[in-house]
Image (cartoon, coloured by chain):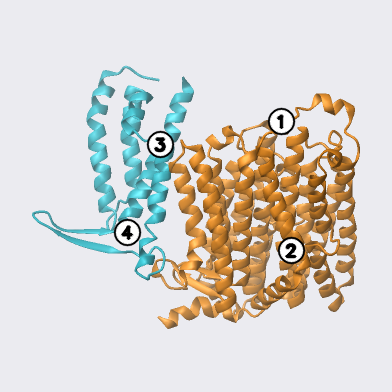
Chain colours: A cyan, B orange
Amino acid sequence: MTSYSLILRTAARFLLPLLLMFSIFLLLRGHDLPGGGFIAGLVASCAFVVYLFAFDVAPVRRMLRLDPRSMVGVGLLLAALSGVPAVFFGEAFFTGLWLELELPRIGEIKLSTPLVFDIGVYLVVLGSVMAIVMALAEGEE
Amino acid sequence: MTLLVGLPVVLPLVLGALSLAIWRFPVAQRVVALVGTAVLLLLGIALLWAVIEHGPMATALGEWRAPFGIVLVADLLSAIMVLMAGIMGFVVALYSLGTVSRGHESFGYFPLLHLLLAGVCGSFLTGDIFNLYVWFEVMLLSSFALLVLGGERAQMEGAIKYVTINLFSSAMLLTAVGLTYGLVGTLNMADIAVKFDGAEDGGRVTVIAMLFMVAFGIKAAAFPLFFWLPASYHTPPVAVSALFAALLTKVGVYAMFRMFTLVFDADTAYTHNILLWIAGFTMVTGVLGAAAQFEFRRILSFHIVSQIGYMLMGLALFTPLALAGGLYAIFHNIIVKTNLFLVSGVAYRLQGTYQLKQLGGLYRSHPGLGVLFLLSALSMAGIPPLSGFFAKFILVRAGLEIEAWVIVAVALAVGIGTLFSMIKIWAEVFWKARPEEATTGAPVMDVASPGLHWLYVPIVLLAGLTVLIGVAGQPIFEVSMQAAEQLLDNSAYIEAVLGSEEGS
């Protein structure tokens, strides 16, 4: 599996943090601009997949910490639960709730239940892609 | 109050995600499954209670009002079906503890179980036709995975037929949904019903109706496209068979009841006449197919098909009494059929085979199991005072009232055929002595293992239920009657969905 290509390994080291940051950017931007949890999750899994090609499965597994299948579960849980808080405010399920915070220096931040939903989607996509890719990579050996 | 309508969908989704998150802890997954399905059962009771008190209820997800957003609607039929799903979920979760192997559990049995229940409850509650398609897919995807869990050769063979025909029917369903949207520009079922009522182009509506009928007919395993069911239902672990038998085809039947009372109730002379033919042939082919089988679960699978015929007969006759009979048949059949599958699982645990020829002597060794089997078997064949008798009685009476002699004769004859099949199982599995060669050849499981007693708990529960809804049939009949009247006079349903728009 491991290709001992120096170029790929060096590039993967740089690409991993870059792509992960980009994926977070896409995730946060997604609310009213192109982006969102799905595409961000795909970008994040690209980051890990490139790393996996360069360094094999084991380091990636260590880096993820959470088993990808559990990650899918946590993501689904987040997404499903993001619809629940609305109920406590007397609204229907999945009604969007917004929390606006004034932070010193940073400025105004809007936190919302759709964001929680998107983070859930992000984790589901990342988890399922990684589960598939890792299973394929391990199956080859 | 409307919170109650959403919870039966959200709860299994959350439970499924939770059990996926705790992938590594099988004991915790089992606890989640038991407690979670018990809560679902309680929710079902609460929902039914609320609907009986207040009439149909609707909630718009995310406050996106009908007819633009997705609504969840609970009328009596939906509420009862959700309750049924709750009962079955709980019973099967209980039964799984003793029958689903560690290996299956580690491949995600419990998360899939919850996801399947979410799909089923979602299909029962949604008031949006495209959303119905989505819930069908959720349910089917989890059922695909459950069906091949373990990956044995026979499972793969069954699964290929199952997946292919179901994808075909899904494609057809999607086409029908698309055509509907093209015709009236809405996906909300209540809104479609209103707009179809005023549609001038009756021909195109009938075409769409037929597309829906084929799509749901495949999913309900009605004649002529039922072969996928007996080809696949006997292959997975028995708890999965039981769950499929309980809920999957019934979702198809439910969708037919919903669409052909709420939406396509204009050209009944055409559509419901075809339904009547389908119902008759489904009954007959199912029962004849069963007569030729000598595998415990295959016989039961063919009887699922034949029982679907009774339910469709209720819908096809299209009188209040007939609809009530069809609904009664659904409730009765879910309980009884599941129980028969559960009994077959115990027989397998005891003697290591599903082949009738190799089974035997169970009445001598386990008389209690024999009695439990007889209760369910005779109930299915329609022997009074068990629940199946009343289901058939109502249907036959409804048929006689509108002088549909042929279908009544068919229904009665098929009842005798069912009795024949059940007696065959009784004679082979329980009555005759165990064949000599089988006692040495078959891998007999450890009878004294504590798990076995747990298997009896759900079977006793369900047998008790079938006796109860037989002996105390009156309240259940009254609820079915009310549900049938709600189906025929759909104004309350439409008002619950679209009326909330003006109320805000």
* Viewer-proximal residue among A49 and B2: B2
* Helix, strand or loop status at disc 3: helix
Q: Is residue B473 left or right of residue B20?
A: right
Three-letter amino acid code of the residue under disc 2? Leu
Indicate the quadrant containing the C terminus of chain B: top left, top right, bottom left or bottom right.
Answer: bottom left
Which residue is labeled 2 in the image?
B468
Three-letter amino acid code of the residue under disc 1? Asp
Measured in 3D between alpha carbons, the distance from the residue under mark 4 to the one under mark 3, in whole angstroms, is 24 Å
In the rendered structure, the residue with mark 4 lies on which chain? A
Measured in 3D between alpha carbons, the distance from the residue under mark 4 to the one under mark 1, in whole angstroms, is 52 Å
* Viewer-proximal residue among B259 and A114: A114
Measured in 3D between alpha carbons, the distance from the residue under mark 1 to the one under mark 3, in whole angstroms, is 37 Å
The quadrant holding residue B132 is: bottom right
User: Taking B188 as reference, is B430 above or below it?
Assistant: above
Q: Is residue A17 left or right of residue B27?
A: left
Label 1 packing within 10 angstroms: few (<14), some (14-19), many (20+) = few
In the rendered structure, the residue with mark 1 lies on which chain? B
Q: Which of the labelled discs sits on residue B358, or is there none?
A: none
In the rendered structure, the residue with mark 2 lies on which chain? B
Coordinates of residue A115 in the picture (x, y in percent): 30, 55
Is the residue at mark 2 from the same chain as the one at mark 1? Answer: yes
Q: Which of the labelled discs sits on residue A113, or is there none?
A: 4
Measured in 3D between alpha carbons, the distance from the residue under mark 2 to the one under mark 3, in whole angstroms, is 47 Å
Q: Which of the labelled discs sits on residue A68, or is there none?
A: 3
Of badges 2 and 3, the one in the foreground is 2
* Helix, strand or loop status at disc 1: loop
Label 4 packing within 10 angstroms: few (<14), some (14-19), many (20+) = many
Three-letter amino acid code of the residue under disc 4? Thr
Q: Is residue B50 left or right of residue A81?
A: right
**Residue sitting farthest toward the top:** A4
